[in-house]
Amino acid sequence: MSDVNKTDISDDSLLLDDAPGAAGFVRYDLVYAYIGQSGPAVAILTGTSSAAVKTAFTASGLDAAPYPSTFDPALPKGTFPLARVYIQTGDTGIANARIADIRDFKGSRNPVADKGRLLLSTGQGRGAVQTAFRWFLTTVESACPGITLAGSSSNGSSFTATQTGTYRFTYSEIGQTSTAFAGISLNSTQPTTSVELANVADVGARLMKISTGATSQGGNMQCDIRMNIGDVARCHVTIGTFNTEGAGTRLSVEKVLDY
């Protein structure tokens, strides 16, 4: 390839744009490969400068996650990301600690995700404020790649994607003391609406009946959900009274595909 192993700046095909001029504003640029009309080539896509990028870098260091990550510009289709470069005000060069190798050879031909799962047990009723969202007491395993768990007695448990992919949710619910449903909602803005009455677009077919009348009976469901970065899934239930809680209420989350 003509633009590999550059030794000077006579050809600017792999030169970064100037650093941001505004103090406190930084960006991530992407180096990528592609096949053009003249054959293989390498290019750089300039990211958007913001104070948020600096805040994230200061808190967590260089972002070495696979593309796309939170502050990445959108690559053209059919390209292959090679590196992510952190650009800060005043920079005239790139230190080793500010460029990350993000070559990822997974894709439609090799999409299987890394192993690991999130496993929760023992229901704790519903959130006191977000009353339709389920809350779990015990985290048994917390190694699901691409998912961040948050939970409280006020808002229930939530599962936020930090990586794009397809996630498998397996949900076992012991049931309530009256007619009730349970399911998995995605990005629901109805935290005080029972799942069977929530927007169908948020719940889809991820719905099971867990009780009939005064007879308590549980249910089990499994569903695969494609999530983008920032998407939030929740165990969404009928607003009602649960039986005495036990370890029979469980949720498993696994990433099965990297797209």
Image (cartoon, rainbow, N blue to C red):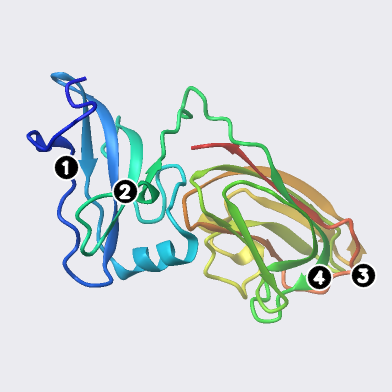
Residue 61 locus on image (x, y percent): 45, 58
Task: Indicate the amino acid at tag 3.
Answer: Thr
Earlier-in-chain disc, 2 versus 4: 2
Q: What residue is shown at x 74% (from left), y 68% (from top)? A: 135
Q: What residue is shown at x 48% (from left), y 29% (from top)? A: 106
**Is residue 223 shown left or right of residue 126?**
left
Residue 15: mark: 1
- Give 200 or 254, whichever is nearer the viewer: 254
Q: Are marks 2 and 4 in contact (CB under 8 Å)?
A: no
Task: Indicate the amino acid at tag 1.
Answer: Leu
Query: What is the crowding at mark 1: few (fewer than 14 residues within 10 Å), some, or many (at least 20)?
Result: few
SS of the residue at dot 3? Answer: loop
Residues under labels 3 and 2: Cα distance? 53 Å
Task: Indicate the amino acid at tag 4.
Answer: Gln
Above or below, 6 relative to 140: above
Single out the mark in the foreground, 3 or 2: 2
Query: Residue tagged by mark 4?
Result: 124
Query: Residue tagged by mark 3?
Result: 244
Above or below, 127 relative to 236: below
SS of the residue at dot 1? Answer: loop
SS of the residue at dot 4? Answer: strand
**Is residue 167 shown left or right of residue 212?**
left
Query: What is the crowding at mark 4: few (fewer than 14 residues within 10 Å), some, or many (at least 20)?
Result: many
Residue 83: mark: none
